[in-house]
Amino acid sequence: MKNRSFGNTGLEVSEICFGPMRFSAKEPGDDAVSRTGKRALERALERGVNFIHSSYEYGTRWAVSDVLATHPRRFDLHHVIKVPVPDFEDGGHFDAGKFRLRVEEALRDLHTEHIAVLQHLQRSKPNSDERRIPDIPTVHPALLETFQKLRDEGLVGALTTFPYTPGFARAALDTGDFTGLVAYYNVIEMEMADFFPGLQEQGHGVLCIRPFMAGLLTDRRADRAALPEDDRMRADSWDAAYARLEQVGTVFGQGVRSWTAFAIQFALAHPIVSSLIVGLNTPEQVDQVIDAAESSQLHLGDFEQAYELYQREGPV
């Protein structure tokens, strides 16, 4: 497994970041799904993954904890955790105690002394730019003060933003308070690529979530006509995405032998992307994704072809 630098932070992370979003049951137990998920994490570590994404919201951190409790590599791993403060019901108020709590519970559960990357989420109800952007000037001073204390204590490393929307991304990144971006990004959802030049110039990194676009960019679902009638991607809301997929297929032609492999390789084609956060539930999925990453021959020119299509056609 290859490593990449996360911007200019000095952090070296594996190109694939293990995502445990749905890899186990929500409650501790010895069920088949959880046993398979734990084997998936063990397989990922065996193959050189050194980066793990987690959140208390997923309800699966207990299974990550079980694997890492006695794992010989646990002190060599890097972690990125979600820190949603303020959250939906907080009325735009930043709670320093809640922020610290999320860090400390992760340190405990993950059997580590350091969280490499904090993925900050600023939420509101409704979770709209109109509500969230005006709160940035009041949230950020308290956010930075709390983050700095945690960093001075050696508990955390980099602070990144998960903006949800391009509008909030622009406002958040313009503050200069973050050293990276965590965002949905794939060959169809390319809105966040607009920020790549500026982030690259500033020496920041990008962590990509959703490289498969919720499963559309996989061999299982890329052929929409072959999907069962009750498949969720038969809904009209996916029409535009499948139309763009057809355009992408025209651009890359015979270069796409497997959409699953292509999705991973494309998301890594731009050098600013440090790691892909991928939900991995079985050892077989781990091997498929890592094999795709390790065999990639896509490069910046491939990104530029897709980005040209996105600029011409607009967002999906």
Image (cartoon, rainbow, N blue to C red):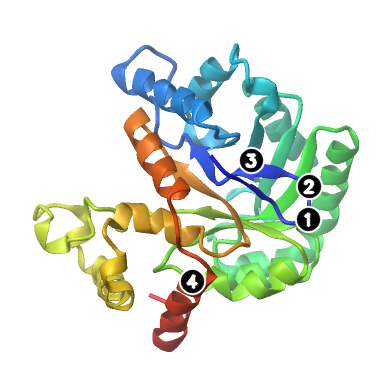
Q: Position of residue 119 (x, y in %)?
A: 65, 48
Side of 81 relative to 288 (left or right):
right
Question: Which disc number belongs to residue 8?
Answer: 1
* Number of numbered discs visible in the structure rendering: 4
- Residue 29 to residue 293: above or below: above
- Compared with residue 232, is residue 156 higher up or lower down, i.e. above or below? above
Amino acid under label 1?
Answer: Asn
Disc 3 target residue: 80
- The kind of residue on which mark 3 rests is Val
Check disc 2 and give the amino acid type. Answer: Gly
Q: Which residue is mark 2?
A: 10
Tell me: 28 left or right of 275: left
The furthest residue to the bottom: 312
Task: Write down the residue under mark 4.
Answer: 303
Residue count near mark 4 (Cα–Cα under 10 Å), binned few <14, some 14–19, many ≥20: many
Which of the marked residues, 3 or 1, is nearer the chain's N terminus?
1
Q: In front of the other: label 3 or label 2? A: 2
Q: Crowding at label 2, few (<14), some or many (≥20) Cα neighbours within 10 Å? A: few
Q: CA distance from mark 4 to mark 1?
A: 22 Å
Tell me the distance, in whole angstroms, between the alpha carbons under discs 3 and 1.
17 Å
Residue 126's spot in the image, x, y percent? 53, 61
Residue type at mark 4 is Phe
Percent x, y of residue 94: 75, 49
Front one among 20 and 302: 302
The local crowd at label 3, few if under 14, some if 14 to 19, many if 20 or more residues have their Cα within 10 Å, is: many
Choose the circle earlier in sequence order: 4 or 3: 3
Mark nearer the viewer, 3 or 1: 1
